Image (cartoon, coloured by chain):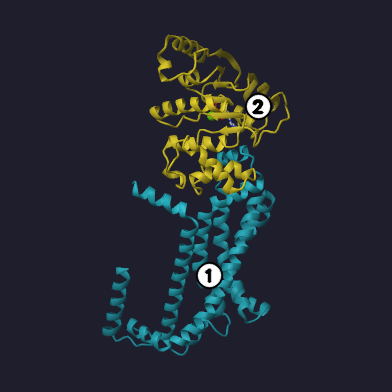
Chain colours: A cyan, B yellow
Amino acid sequence: MIILVVLIVIWEIWVQFGDIPKWQLPAPSAIAQEIVASWSLLLHHAYITLQEIVAGFFVALIFGLLLATAVTHSKILERAILPIIVSSQTIPIIAIAPLLLIWVGYGLASKIIVVVLISFYPIAVNTIDGLKAINTDMVAMMRSLGASRWQIFTKLQIPTSLPYMFSGIKVGISISVIGAVIGEWVGASGGLGYLIKYSQPLFLTSRVFAAIFVLSIMGVALFALAGLVERLMLPWYYAEKRAKSASQ
Amino acid sequence: MVEVNQLSKSFSTEEGERKVLDNITFRVNTGEFVSVIGPSGCGKSTLLHIIAGIDEADGGEIKINGDANSPKLGHIGYMQQKDLLLPWRTVLDNVILGLELKGVAKLEARQKAIEHIETFGLKGFENQYPFVLSGGMRQRASFLRSVLLHQEVMLLDEPFGALDALTRHQMQEWLMNLWRTLGNTIILVTHDTDEALLLSDKIYVMSARPAKIVMSLEVDLPRPRTHATVTEPEFAKLKAKLLAQLHEK
Ligand SMILES: Nc1ncnc2c1ncn2[C@@H]1O[C@H](COP(=O)(O)OP(=O)(O)O)[C@@H](O)[C@H]1O
Ligand SMILES: [Mg+2]
């Protein structure tokens, strides 16, 4: 926090005394003024981007969890699906994003798909790790108590995987912000990515920075929200972690 | 009554077949406390896994009350050395796990469990997460999880192995009292001669791998026993017999 403040102060002084033109690098104070001046414009575009992120993230969550369940359910599915999941990440999103425009048009759908493509991956991979993290002694204990396969899945495997799943969710929700911007970049009629793209050629550099600032605030807020949900859903995990760090 | 008849078991490993159990036969009468003692790695846990129904034997059979096909999973209590409490459940919700898996409603299951919380020394900890508990309390919670299912046969796999000596002694006395009130059939696996002699009616000694039963010893020490029993001459005599067998090469 202190580091951040110091950096901003250095930036401000550097721009003020270095006579750097505003269209090249605006001072933080100029960006702040821009945020106030274009508040309603920023809000309008932020709202569009947020819709894309939220919709894309939830689709990615469901998709990621389904894939993880399928992969850990049978060896055959694992061999069939896992290579596809991994190779999907080697495709540069920036290259297929324009194709999406051709396929599904300029609307929200193309952006949502980009968000899904980017953020399902950490969710799926972490959840797979989590579902595999069960201890064989625990499984033996459950079986000896008469648990069915389904009960072992719901009462042992899923709870074991939750901390892993939340790690994936926190990464996924952060990068879904990037996904939405990429989606807007290649073709859109609104959103903060769109605003950045069209402010740049006009040398409205403070507006570009203002939009970036709002994007990062959104990213941080979404991350914090995911962290909050995690704390509410995993009270035992945090209680244990706290106790352990206190005893050290 | 539990009858183990000519049980054999091998595992295939990278170095080839590993024979673990070789024609194991013994019998435990209803209400009896029997210990199986043997060197580390001889196949004690494997034996209990098979009796519990978690693993299958290559040959032989297990009869429960004369029935070789009686269902095992969910019907035979099985406690491992590790307490295996679920970290995301409170103590109370951990002990009702078995009832819950059987379809008993949570509220009803909790009601039943609360009646026993005091006997199991868990009063005041019902709503805590298990990491708060001491080693002995964790084991008692795991016992209660089994006991609530009212299973006639209970298998205990070195349940006190990870506890410090003093806690272990307290737990042994506590278990003797519990068994007296429950009156169920217990098979305890251990490598601790004092523990086996103190608790059991009968002890079977297993050899090193591939394990055979090499000795059966009646422990006719009068009950109730306490830790003072360990110092009596009768106890020492039995212990000498047991040690002689265990150290025989
Ligand atoms: N799943 C398995 N695969 C291969 N070997 C095993 C397996 N389970 C146990 N063993 C081997 O069987 C032997 C007996 O193991 P175990 O029953 O755990 O011994 P104990 O409980 O008496 O210490 C050991 O040598 C162990 O390595
Ligand atoms: Mg063992």
Quadrant in which residue B15 is drawn: top right
Spot occupied by residue B129 in the image (x, y as percentages of width and height)? 46, 47
Chain letter of disc 2 in the image: B
Q: Residue at x 38, y 49 (%)?
A: A243
* Viewport quadrant of the N terminus of chain B: top right
* Drawn side of residue B48 relative to residue A9, left or right: right
Q: Report the disc number at residue A229.
A: none
Please name the amino acid that badge 2 sits on: Lys
Q: How many marks?
A: 2
The kind of residue on which mark 1 rests is Ser
Q: Residue at x 58, y 83 (%)?
A: A188
Between B44 and A231, the residue placed more toward the observer is A231
Q: Position of residue B55 (x, y in %)?
A: 65, 33
Residues indicated by labels 2 and 1 sit on the same polypeptide chain: no
Residue A119 in the image: state x and y as whole percent: 55, 66
**Secondary structure beneath label 1:** helix
Asked if the residue under mark 1 is in contact with the one under mark 2, i.e. CB atoms within 8 Å, the reply is no
Where disc 2 sits, the SS reads strand
Which quadrant of the picture is home to ligand 1? top right
Left or right position of A30 against A217: left
Residue picked out by circle 2: B9
Identify the residue position indicated by label 1 in the image.
Answer: A176
How many residues crowd around disc 2 within 10 Å: few (fewer than 14), some, or many (20 or more)?
Answer: many
Distance from Cα at disc 2 to Cα at disc 1 = 53 Å
**Image position of B214 with respect to B59: above or below:** above
Q: Is residue A63 above or below residue B47?
A: below
